[in-house]
Image (cartoon, grey):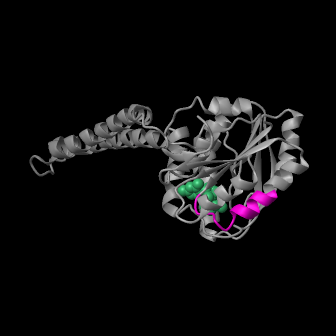
Amino acid sequence: MQISVIIPIYNEEENIDLLYKRLTGVLHDLKLTYELIFVNDGSKDKSLQLIKNLIKQDTEVKYIDFSRNFGHQIAVTAGLDRAIGETIVIIDADLQDPPELIADMYAKIKEGYEVVYARRKKREGESRMKKFTANAFYRILSRITDVDIPVDTGDFRIMDRRIVDELKKMPEQHKFLRGQISWIGFRQTYVEYDRDERHAGNTGYTYRKMLRFALDGITGFSDFPLKIVTFLGISVTGFSFLVLVYVLLSRFIWEDYAPGWASLMLSILFIGGVQMIAIGIIGEYLSRMNSNLRQRPLYIVRESNIGK
Ligand code: UDP
Ligand code: MG
């Protein structure tokens, strides 16, 4: 098996047939033996039925049907878990990622790169708000993480088997695949493309899901927020020392004070500062533990035609 294509599906009934046609067109041109892994992430429409129809005409079509909606990153992870190809492609089902680009990306793999991701030059047909938030997010993220996560890049990419084998060793619950793949390293490069509009249907990424995803990315790859807390604690403590001078002056030199006020002010400020430092430090440990503690399975499969 030369190439596995992983396609997460959440309510994509209007896109599946055209996607299949364009994908297999490219794969046939490249003369590659392939498998297409559709991961149905709890779709509420006829997506699963359409996938099953494809299986009747093409035995290289595989599917994994989730027991409910687990989210895009988990759907891709399930595909990675079961893909057997030498090279693995991750692509959206809504044709925002043009399948034809796989030819260019595959050529780079043949040059010896282990990861080729697709970097968007333009994004068509997405709301201003979405473009603005995505833009800001990628830039903030790249500032506060140590890992070099490429900007303006989604999960549309092609990878060597070795990358996927490494990914499978990372059991973390809150997946941020594009960050994990950057973290793994090897030789990575990109091709540029203009991101098309969604062919049909609506985005499955609500602002809520986007926010959660952004937080997964930040907490998974940066301790910066925790450091802010610690920094805050240190600042408050420092400030309380300034107030200490003022309070002592008003008590003993200027003798202009309300009895009891001095000690009260001091202890409140000081304890407050120390507490924030403490919470910051505990948080440093807690955030690391928390993500490793809950050993729930990442997803539940209802049915699949991949033996395993
Ligand atoms: N998707 C998924 N589960 C979800 C949301 C989305 O599997 O909970 C899939 C969706 O079917 C598509 C891909 O992930 O193939 C990207 O989603 P979408 O196009 O809705 O996101 P956007 O491009 O708007 O960021
Ligand atoms: Mg999309």
Point out residue 107 in the picture as x, y percentages from the top left corner: 88, 42
Question: Is 17 covered by the magenta stretch?
Answer: yes
252 left or right, relative to 92: left
Residue 128: x percent and y percent? 63, 70
Quadrant of the rendered image containing residue 47: bottom right
Can see residue 98?
A: no
Q: What stretch of residues is rendered in magenta?
A: 10-22
Q: Nearer the viewer, residue 209 or 243?
A: 209
For the point 40% across and 32% down, which residue is it?
A: 293
**Nearest the eye: 86 or 232:** 86
Kindly identify the residue that appears in the image at 58 percent across and 59 percent down: 10
Q: Quadrant of the C terminus?
A: top right
Q: From this viewpoint, which residue is outermost toward the front?
A: 56
Above or below, comparing residue 188 to residue 197 in the picture: above
The answer to which image quadrant residue 82 occupies is top right
**Observer-nearest residue: 302 or 248?**
302
Give the image location of residue 268, x and y in percent: 21, 44
The stretch drawn in magenta includes residue 213: no
Residue at the image position 32 percent from the left and 34 percent from the top: 278
For residue 228, side relative to residue 201 (left or right): left
For ligand 2, the image quadrant comes to bottom right
Q: Position of residue 59 (x, y in %)?
A: 73, 47
